[in-house]
Amino acid sequence: MSDIQKNVQAAIDELVESGAERGVQVAVYRNGEQIVDAVAGVADPETGREVTSGTLFYNFSIGKGATATVAHVLAERGLFGYDTPIAELWPEFGAHGKEGVTIRQALNHTAGVPGIPVESTVEDICDWDKMCAAIADAEPWWEPGTQMGYHAYSFGYIVGEVVRRATGKPISQVLLEEVAGPLGVGEELYFGMPVAEHGRLAVLEDEPVTADAFGDMPTDLPMFRAGPMTLFPSATLGNRTDVLAADIPAGGKTSARAIARMYAALLGEMDGVRLVSPERLSEMTAVSFSGPDQVFGMPSTWGLGYALGGPSSDTPTAFGMAGAGGSYAYADTATGLVVAVTKNKLTGDFAVPVRVAEIVAEA
């Protein structure tokens, strides 16, 4: 056993033993080879089912990385370009001045449609056609391409509908056929997950909070216009059968090793599979937009579908996606490293991926 494997294992064991975490997976790849496969804790406290390397977690926005990857694979095949107007594929999207919004602007969160209707219900977000119709009819919050704001839910529907219009298939099918299947993780990387498979999922739980997490925030923050707070990521939402079964490609259900294999196949060849060319990888991971997030307020730097900087935001060559609750998956084009952390206690920070990143950097 390597020192890096031992050190990561010791770190997550300690987190579980202390009660800070319930169940954790860590997968690390270097130049296409897995160098860390560490698990700790339980997937389901009620039954005592332990986390294994094949346990799946609903990791919320980690799934956006898979959504973006599907788009890049299709762009590589020539089905569309980054500067193709979305309305060329999806004419209805061009309503209310959005006819010029491009696929690039959808990927870098500058499309100007960061919200979904504030009256949306959980049942609504599981209804693909209803959500796409609402987003197509939305008025942009800003002139597309001029500002950036995190498209928390709408990103998945916009990119997913572009994929559907270009291929005639739902994005979940394209993910399986073009990404997960070829990489041997067709049963570990999903948008919509078949109900019969839900018993393989870790059960999410919320970290105890002592006060309303939004209580001290001004009520006029743009984030409150971007969708109802009832749809804010939580264990209640993420454990629902309908949410787990639905294509909501702003999030995804995956094991750490599955999403890590995907990133490894973006960096280079992974068991004979390379998802994109080196030239496309460079374009995908270059800074596409940087500035204050118009929805959440923080400074942000985006490539095409991936946040840049890694869990500490200080590694400019890292690209990937965080998930609400503290999970993270990313790759570093400079080092050939891929790190994925999945877990089932939804915490308000990224302490676990940051600690894992530190261990990997020290090795």
Image (cartoon, grey):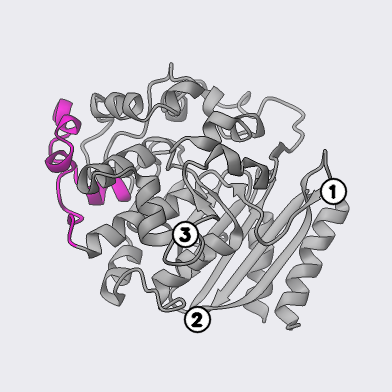
Point 72% across, 59% down: residue: 52
Q: Is residue 46 left or right of residue 90?
A: right
**Image: 132 above or below 173:** above
Q: Earlier in the sequence, mark 2 or mark 1?
A: 1
- Looking at marks 1 and 3 on the same chain, the residue that comes earlier in the sequence is marked by 1
- Distance between mark 2 and mark 3 Cα atoms: 16 Å
Residue 294 appearing in the image = yes
Amino acid on which disc 2 is placed: Asn
Residue tagged 3:
320
For the point 23% across and 45% down, which residue is it?
Answer: 145
Q: Which residue is mark 2?
A: 31
| Direction from residue 197 to residue 298 in the image, left or right | left
Question: Circle 1 — which element?
Answer: loop
* Segment tinted magenta in the rendering: 78-107
Going by the numbered disc 1, the residue's amino acid type is Gly
Q: CA distance from mark 2 to mark 1?
A: 34 Å
Task: Determine which residue is flagged by label 1.
Answer: 19
